[in-house]
Amino acid sequence: MRLGILGGTFDPPHVGHLLAASDAFEKLELDRLLFIPAATHPFKGERVGATPPQRLDMLALVIADDARFGIDTIEIERPGLSYTVDTLTDLARRYPDAERFFLIGEDLVDQVATWRAPERLAQLAEIVVLARSREPGMAAPRFRRLETRRIDVSSTEIRARARAGLSLHGFVPDAVAAYIRDAGLYR
């Protein structure tokens, strides 16, 4: 089994996450890709706007009935701060025979060395950088580089648009936009 692992705060999840996951699924020939929302990101603290249950609800709306994708609540269920090395260790125990691919964005490449037990990460999963730029030097040489579509959308921008009362159509699936509106998120 080839297992992709995509973590993040997903606050909110958007079309960029979905397209990057689709690209990784196809190019890495994965059997399954797990979205793993963080409860509290060690580097972001309490800055997330939606609660963990709300982010889970929105992720479920984003992946809908797509059998390629699943959601794992391992980090939300873990008390305290959640570290990538702990998550990958748990997933290695649960999927011992799987070939695991940990997917990160280019923006995280320089941070990996500051994470807890960074040397252990590559033992638990192949680290794959989802590269949106076409510049070959953007990914660290020790990580696999996978070119994905250039989708210039971010959760930060979506939260700002919601705060300003602007349309989220095209940034998130319509079901997620309705969820954000109905829950009064990011206002």
Image (cartoon, rainbow, N blue to C red):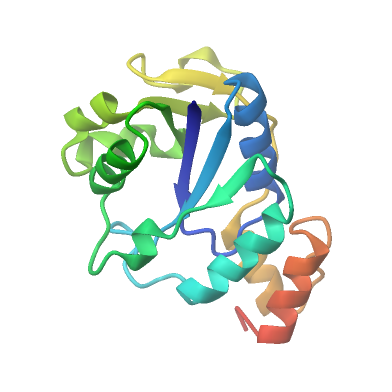
Relative to residue 184, is residue 55 drawn left or right? left
Query: How far from the left and from the top, in percent, is residue 175?
Result: 78, 68
Residue at left 60%, top 26%? 133
How many badges with numbers are in the image? 0
Relative to residue 65, is residue 76 drawn left or right? left
Front-most of 60 and 137? 60
Residue at left 57%, top 61%? 156
Give residue 150's quadrant in the image: top right
Is residue 164 shown to the viewer in this render?
no
Is residue 12 shown to the viewer in this render?
yes
Give residue 168's quadrant in the image: bottom right
Q: Is residue 51 above or below residue 69?
A: below
Residue at left 61%, top 60%? 59
Query: How far from the left and from the top, in percent, is residue 155?
Result: 59, 59
Front-most of 60 and 169? 60
Give residue 176's quadrant in the image: bottom right
Q: Is residue 29 above or below residue 160?
A: above
Query: How far from the left and from the top, in percent, is residue 149?
Result: 70, 30
Relative to residue 170, is residue 25 drawn left or right? left
Residue at left 25%, top 41%? 89
Front-most of 58 and 104? 58
Which of the image's four quarters has the C terminus?
A: bottom right
Relative to residue 52, is residue 142 drawn left or right? left
Query: How far from the left and from the top, in percent, is residue 87?
Result: 30, 47
